[in-house]
Image: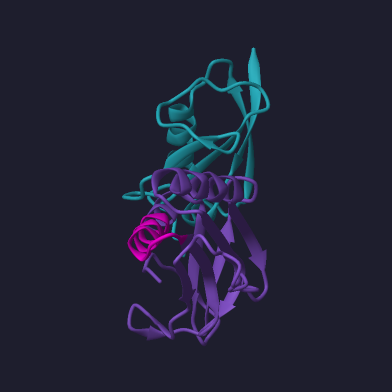
Chain colours: A purple, B cyan
Amino acid sequence: MIKTEIVQGKIDPFPSEDNHTGEGAEVVFNGRVRETENGKPIVALEYEQYEGMADQELEALAKETVEKFPIHDLFCRHREGEVPVGESSLHISVWAPHRKEALDALSWFISELKKRVPIWKWAIYPDGTKEATSHEC
Amino acid sequence: MTIQVTVRCFSHVREALGKDVLNLELEDDTDTSTVENKIREMAGDNLDGITLRVAVNREYMPEPIALKNGDEVALIPPVQGG
């Protein structure tokens, strides 16, 4: 099963449940906003999306990941708008029978997300100015 | 015969043009590469060195295609999700 969403405001994490009896690995990833970009302090990152295409690409990528790797479930929430330092901008939960495929699937999914899902981010500095950034979470 | 297309602008493209949306009237059978060239020309040197992928009606187009009346085109600068 897959579930993907682009959300505004704080990300509500997917529940860590005890009823996935067929999966021995639950891998959870939280991408958080660092306090510096390009060596300069920031107060937040601002994410913008191509509404209607970003969610479509995110869902297609999740489906492709579940088909490519022997995993059962992939859940992803990506935030849009302003995300203060320390908060999570990306939350992913992968369930698989074994850890290796869960970790491999997670790594591939994030790499592809950064190549094809039309979302962009801007560093916001303490003086309120903004600058495009391409650094990874 | 002309067609109307909408160009959605994001990130560097929006900054370069100062607009979120452009409505263009084009000759029939204009393809996406012509739209990209037009946008780059409008942007001056602000998009130099920036690779743009093309989406039509919210799907990536790996090759130039002829546009139809009412199409939505986006020139997508390198994405930065995560």
- From the top left corner, tell me how far across and down residue A121 is, in percent: 49, 65
Residue A105 falls within the magenta-colored stretch: yes
Is the magenta region chiefly helix, strand or loop? helix
| Vertical arrangement, residue B69 with respect to residue A61, above or below | above
Query: Can residue A66 be seen?
Result: yes
| Vertical arrangement, residue A110 with respect to residue B30, above or below | below
Front residue (pair B7, B45):
B7
Residue A72 falls within the magenta-colored stretch: no
Q: Residue at x 54, y 64 (%)?
A: A21
Q: Residue at x 36, y 55 (%)?
A: A108
Front residue (pair A79, B79):
A79
Front residue (pair A23, A120):
A23
Looking at the image, which residue sits at the far front? A21
Image quadrant containing the C terminus of chain A: bottom left
Query: Can residue B81 be seen?
Result: no
- From the top left corner, tell me how far across and down residue B57 is, in percent: 60, 34
- From the top left corner, tell me how far across and down residue B22 is, in percent: 63, 41
- From the top left corner, tell me how far across and down residue B82 is, in percent: 46, 65
Front residue (pair A40, B82):
B82
- Tally the marks: 0
Q: Which residues are magenta?
A: A96-110
| Vertical arrangement, residue B82 with respect to residue B51, above or below | below
Q: Is residue A101 left or right of residue B28?
A: left
Q: Residue at x 43, y 41 (%)?
A: B53
| Vertical arrangement, residue B81 with respect to residue B2, above or below | below
Q: Is residue B9 left or right of residue B44?
A: right
Looking at the image, which residue sits at the far top? B1
